[in-house]
Amino acid sequence: MKKNVEGVDVPNTRADCTDKDLKKWEKNAKAKKWLVCGVGPDEHSRIQSCTAAKEFRDTLKVAHEGTPQVKRSRGTLLYSQYENFTMKEGETIQEIYTRFIRLTNELKSLGRIILKEDKVEKILTRVLPVTWESKPIAIQESMNIVTLKLDELI
């Protein structure tokens, strides 16, 4: 940008740009192109008015991740769901596993990492209904829970 005779910022013309400026412009144009090609119609309307690739990225980041306060409250809500996670009536083991992995992956994306052994312990001791009581006990007695992977448990 440069100031015109009235003192207003206006874009540089091509003649005013140095080789370094042109390379920056080219990189920005490529980045914008890739971002525009990779978003759907909803996201496209959000970034349509953006002029720089960084502005595109920042706008999409806030739209999908939220502000730090939103991320924190979302993490708290998801962690509460994790703590209260139980098997639903008529739910299969595979459905529990899918729901549980989705929840722990969302927590991980927000920076709340749950250790593998904690996931296994959670499923074995607090998720399954009381009617399944003998199965977790048999698994705990026959396998090393510390090294047991969640996939193996399922």
Image: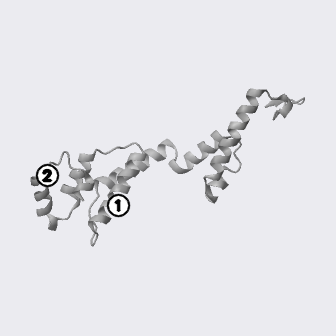
| Residue 18 quadrant | top right
* Residue sticking out furthest to the right: 5
Amino acid type indicated by mark 1:
Arg
| Left or right placement of residue 41 versus residue 153 in this view | right
Task: Report the label total.
Answer: 2
Q: Amino acid at mark 2?
A: Met
- Residue drawn 28% across and 53% down? 83
Asked if 124 appears above or below 114 in the picture, the reply is below
- Residue position for label 2: 143
Q: Residue at x 68, y 47 (%)?
A: 33
Residue 38, label in figure: none
The N terminus appears in which quarter of the rendering?
Answer: top right
Q: Quadrant of the C terminus?
A: bottom left
Q: Position of residue 74 (x, y in %)?
A: 43, 50
Q: Is residue 146 or residue 60 the one in the foreground? A: 146
Give the x, y percent position of residue 54.
Answer: 63, 39
- Helix, strand or loop at label 1? It is helix
Quick one: SS at disc 2? loop
Residue 72 in percent (x, y) is at 43, 44
Disc 1: which residue: 99
Local crowd size for mark 2, using a 10 Å CA cut-off: few (<14), some (14–19), many (≥20): few
